[in-house]
Amino acid sequence: EHGKLAEHVTLYLRHCMKVLLNDPKTVSFECSRLVEWLNYFKEDLYDVTLNDLLEFRDKLRESLSASTINLKLSTICHFYWYARSQGWCGSHIIGINNMVRTERYAIPVEPVTRGGRYFKIPFLLPVPPSRIKPIPSSEQLIKIKDDIAENSEKSTHRLSLELNVRNQLIIRWMSEAGLRRQEVSSLHISDIQDIKCSEALKFHKNIILIPIVVTRGTKFGKSRVVDVEASLIAETINFIDVERETFPNHDKVKNVFVSARSGKCLGVIKPSSLTN
């Protein structure tokens, strides 16, 4: 807010990216959280106490969810832990209180049990269990595919048949290959064509799984390998070679699935929009 460079914060973020090898998006989020803390805490950066963090936490409760607040508190505590390890501040600022040696810290944390990196933060907010999203049944998937086909038949769009093929494939990549919405829309032609067409077609009639590396649109920016039926790969390759060729500006984008109106990437796909 005051426009000055927070040198220690900058060095910490560089450490996250260069040493810890955190994803750039993760580091960007950590940066925004620390900036928010710097703008809130008007005192010297290292004059912080537990009460300051608790007041910050409670102020955020007015507008943010518990999980979001916990992420902010975690980022702040990890910064102070790193600052202490670098000697930028007194060793009293954050640590695990020791009753025997009468050690007391401004920000007391607890020993890590498992899963944490250095410590456990005892003043995080309780997060209610998230509601498990129901997985569509086979009957529901059949109905979705039937609805897509029916709407395509009723449509007066000049590419209605091609849209039916595209939308049916999108549903298959989600339900059969297990790709998330963003992963499907971010799928590139090269991801499919790197697998020889003949290899996919060779096993078209058999349930043979072929591994594909998904690198774009993934959760937390991490790559993952998914096993895809050869028949789905073969039909996607056929869509790229035939139906997709009729879409406007199809040769200007790398995505497999593009808009029939603009020829651009679909963005985050809403399954409901495919059946409307």
Image: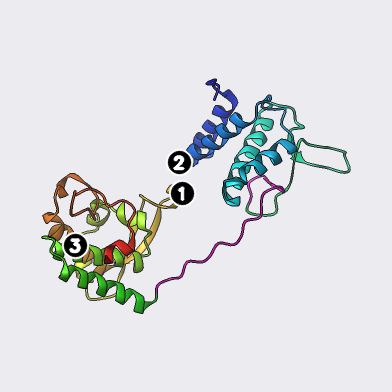
Instruction: Indicate which label's residue lies in the foreground, 1 or 3.
Output: 3
Question: Within 10 angstroms of label 3, few (less than 14), some, or many (20 or more) residues?
Answer: many
Q: Residue at x 36, y 54 (%)?
A: 182
Q: Is residue 4 left or right of residue 105?
A: left
What secondary structure is marked by label 1?
helix
Report which residue position mark 2 lands on: 25
Q: Is residue 236 visible?
A: yes
Specify the label residue 220 is tagged with. 1
Displayed quadrant of residue 83: top right
Q: Are marks 2 and 3 in contact (CB under 8 Å)?
A: no
Instruction: Give the mark nearer the N terminus: 2 vs 3.
Output: 2
Say what amino acid the circle numbered 3 marks: Leu
Disc 3, SS: helix
Query: Comparing marks 2 and 3, which lies closer to the viewer?
Result: 3
Amino acid type at mark 2: Lys
Tag 2's secondary structure? helix
Type of the residue with mark 1: Phe
Q: Are marks 2 and 1 in contact (CB under 8 Å)?
A: yes
User: Is tag 1's residue or tag 3's residue first in the polypeptide sequence?
Assistant: 3
**What residue span does the magenta drawing correspond to?**
116-136
Res 19 visible: no
User: Is residue 65 found left or right of 223 in the rendered image?
Assistant: right
Please say if 260 is above or below 90: below
Q: Vertical placement of 37 versus 131: above or below?
A: above
- 3D distance between C-alphas at marks 2 and 3: 33 Å
* Residue found 40% across the figure and 72% down from its top: 136
Residue 4 in the image: state x and y as whole percent. 55, 20
